[in-house]
Amino acid sequence: MLQRFVYSVGFFLLLCALRASAGGVPDSHQPLIDRLKPINGFSGSFEQTLVDANGDQIQQTRGTLTAVKPGLLRWHAEPPYEQLIVVDGERMWLYDPDLQQVTTQGYRNDLARTPAMLLVGETEGLRESYQVFREQTDDGERFTLIPRDNGSLYSKILLGFVGNTPVEMVLWDSLEQRTRIRFKDVVLNPTAEAGLFTFQAPPDADVIYND
């Protein structure tokens, strides 16, 4: 279940066994922090594609997300791979309607485990967790993050910006599979209703606690 969660969200639970090389200017933590710090919230739609080590597409999903500092997230992947993920600041909830199953665990604001929180300016621990490389693109910048810990969940993370807006996140896992998430219709610092980040398990769903 938690492996499915990784491929749905693109940023949570995969063990990483390899290190990847990165191009660009090293020690680029401060430029990335300067990009991310003003972002207190992030909403939009996404298209997520999972490809294997040979570049063949395994799965593609679309959906919507809203993330707000500190540590609030709602991620809804549409059918046929429908899943709902809610982080309420204390717990993370994954609901799979097909399985009628809810998986939950305590949430830790740990960038090494939840790099998506970078999208809402959660940069504490960035220097300690990652090496950061920066390169210019035709319409913005691209940052590559390499975990300092060999036991990290990812081998490499890429964040792409057009202007000040994050438009892409790519994650590489230990199987050399790549998850690419493209963001569209992005709104920075949106007004979000608190109820978005409250989860109530359906009465007929099994609830599994992974604490």
Image (cartoon, rainbow, N blue to C red):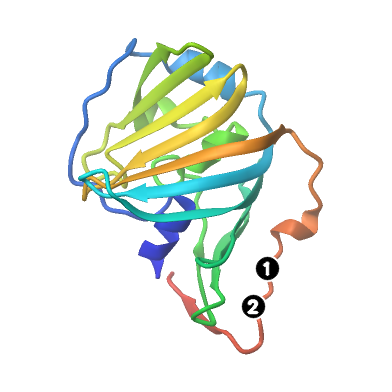
- Residue 180 lies in what quarter of the image? top left
Q: Is residue 161 left or right of residue 125?
A: right
Q: Which residue is mark 1?
A: 199
Camera-side residue of 61 and 169:
61
Q: Which residue is mark 2?
A: 201
In percent of the image, x 48 and y 48: which residue is there?
A: 48
Identify the element where label 2 is drawn.
loop
Give how far across and how far down residue 68 sits, in percent.
Answer: 68, 43
Marks 1 and 2: in contact by CB < 8 Å? yes
- Residue 26 lies in what quarter of the image? top left
Identify the element where label 1 is drawn.
loop
Q: Is residue 4 left or right of residue 167?
A: left
In percent of the image, x 51 and y 62: which residue is there?
A: 106
Query: Given the image, on which type of amino acid does mark 1 rest?
Result: Phe
Q: Relative to 106, is 145 above or below?
A: above
Q: Residues within 10 Å of mark 2 (few under 14, many from 20)?
A: some
Query: Given the image, on which type of amino acid does mark 2 rest?
Result: Ala
